[in-house]
Image (tube, coloured by chain):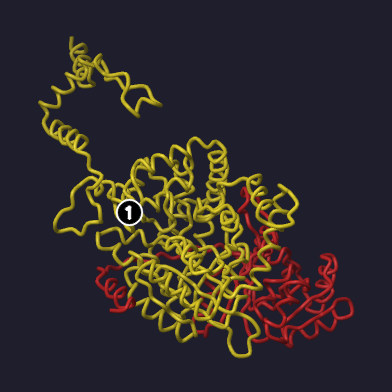
Amino acid sequence: MSGNAFGARIRQALDDAALRANFRQAMGGFIERRAAQFPDPEDLQRRRDRAAAIRADSLRRLPQLLEQLEAQLIANGIRVHWARDAAEANALIAGLLAERGVGKVVKGKSMVTEEIGLNEHLAEQGVQVIESDLGEFIIQLAGEAPSHIVVPAVHKNRRQIAELFRRHIRGVEPTEDVDELTAIARRELRHHFATAGAGISGVNFMVAENGSLCLIENEGNGRMTTTVPPLHIAVTGIEKAIPSQADLAPLLDLLPKSATGQPITTYVNLIGGPRRDGERDGPSEVHLVLLDNGRSRMQVREGFIDSLRCIRCGACINHCPVFVQIGGHAYGSTCPGPIGLVLEPQRRGLEQAGDLLSACTLCGRCGEVCPVEIPLPSLIARLRHEAVEPADDDVAALPGQGRLRRWPEALLWRIWAWINARPRAWRMSLWLATRLRGLMPKRLGGWTRYRAAPKPAARSLHEILARRRNDERA
Amino acid sequence: MSAREAILGRLKAWPRQEMPRAQPSRQPQDPLQRFAERMTAVKGEVAVCADAREVPAVVADWLREAGARQLMTGLAPRLDALLDELAPSFDCLRFGQDFETLSDLLFESVDAGISYCEAGVAESGSLVIASSPDQPRTLSLVPPLHVALLPRQRLLDDLPDLFAEWRDQPVPPNRILISGPSKSADIEQVLAYGVHGPKRLLAVVFG
């Protein structure tokens, strides 16, 4: 991705009045509903500390947890597969489907399958993939990617959705009523649940002590996906392991409250294995694909392991003043918003994804709302620094470190630093700036397109105070 | 080297440190009142029967009002009495064959599923249902109406209590916590019910 491409997508998003109205409307609601769930700031802080400690502890013990998890899953009859990267994961899943002659798959919402481009890969293999989450279903009809990790079709309003349904679903009466639109999707998808050869889902948490998979959702499509077809394949990142069932409670408490302002999701699905002897329903096979795709490298540079605590609630995205203006598509990445700014450059390198780092005002709001206390603002600042500073020899560098360095900018800051470290030079520069303020140009590139040009004051603060002191003495 | 060894090898090189754990806070309140508050807040319906003998009439009234004709339960013997009383008014079926055989019936014609809860959680307003041979998981998922029976003494305070109870138990193939009917706000953040799961849910707390 070049800077121009990101800039062009931002420009396009800013010029789309309907898109901006849709986002402003939705994000404001999220912020209010979340706040209503946490009336007591001290209580919220205690809950965040606890959730952060659980996630941090899980990550520190990750290799042991994964080995324990694997043994427990196998004991429960769940088959475990490991995938180093997207290509391995896609090939694994396509192989499982091909071996069983599966031609149609229903999917629950999963950001990891977006990350690895699973739908495109399966389509190339001739497998029909049906997204079953209402939002994902809508954007699949539109041929688009999610614009938000929790509410993927938030950029569409009901008129646009009604038009999509009318165009793509046979025998649909035109309607803009939300209940009727929902009923249309229900009818259309029921048929697919009943006839699909496999269901593919993500996972929210993997419990190591007993080998169970926890999936949360509101619609029931996730349950359909993991219950009705004969084969269930779960795909998730290795960072989702937690030690025990007891650790689920604090996380299940904070995740939906932070995400959509709900006390709990409609369904908390705990999967402990395939259909057992005597059971009448449930998949006869359950597989779990554990994806690395750069995650095991994230701790190499100290502090960045914290970004793996993420539980994908989207609170940082909902509270980001930049996201609200441009929406998720402009980022051109699986994960938009503050967490995307931190994850994407680590996954794809600074050359590929470093431009995203400009989409931040460092206002700090994301760090304040994160339920697992990921220090997002400081991680973004560190990545920005790495994007313009050549790597030290003794520290592991991201691919493309220092690639965004521009020499005029670097030179200016070097001069600025030199002046600010020398009192005499600093006073001289102030004297010059105040005396020559008339020479300040009226136009300063992009800065003055939306703002007045700054003008230095006639006298520096030091001069003004010195004069006042003299006057008082006199 | 296999993918498994490669990933675990990299992870094992991670540095280790310890971090303290905080304790959660609790708020006392009557569990049944809390449960009913939470459940109705998410559009679940709650009926309380002080006497278990009231249950069939309460369930029948609700099903009639919801327009149900055909219902299905698992094979659990503890549901026999209820079914005997519902049989004259409704077409009562039992989940006695594999899902593959019953799939069309479940997706096309059954109006209501009836299931028996392992527990309830007051603080989150949740019903807890474990799958077993006599309690299939699709009963609480596929039909448009769902009735869940919960013995009052199985109502726990909060999720930590629930998970503590499970600590040394074997894991059933599926456990589901249900808080209200199926819903979505994917279209303009407007809540719509019955997206894929049941459109209406009745929790009957008895005893």
Q: Residue at x 49, y 35 (%)?
A: A15
Quadrant in the picture for residue A264: bottom right
Residue at numbered disc 1: A345
Q: Closest to the observer: A147 or A378?
A: A147
Q: What residue type is labelled 1?
A: Pro
- Numbered disc 1: what chain? A
Q: Where is residue A272 in the image (x, y as percent from the top left)?
A: 52, 80
* Image coordinates for residue B43, horizontal then vertical, percent: 70, 59
Depth check: B119 or A350 in front? A350
- Chain B representation colour: red
Near-viewer residue (A72 or B79): A72
Is A323 on the left or on the right of B157, as rendered? left
Q: Which residue is drawn at 20% across and 14% down?
A: A435
Quadrant of the snapshot with the C terminus of chain A: top left
In the picture as drawn, the residue positioned furthest to the top comes out as: A474
Chain letter tied to yellow: A
Q: What element carries label 1?
A: helix
Percent position of residue A147, x then y = 50, 50
Q: In this view, does A258 lie to the left or right of A195?
A: left
User: What is the x, y in percent for residue A391?
Assistant: 18, 52
Q: How many labels does the image show?
A: 1
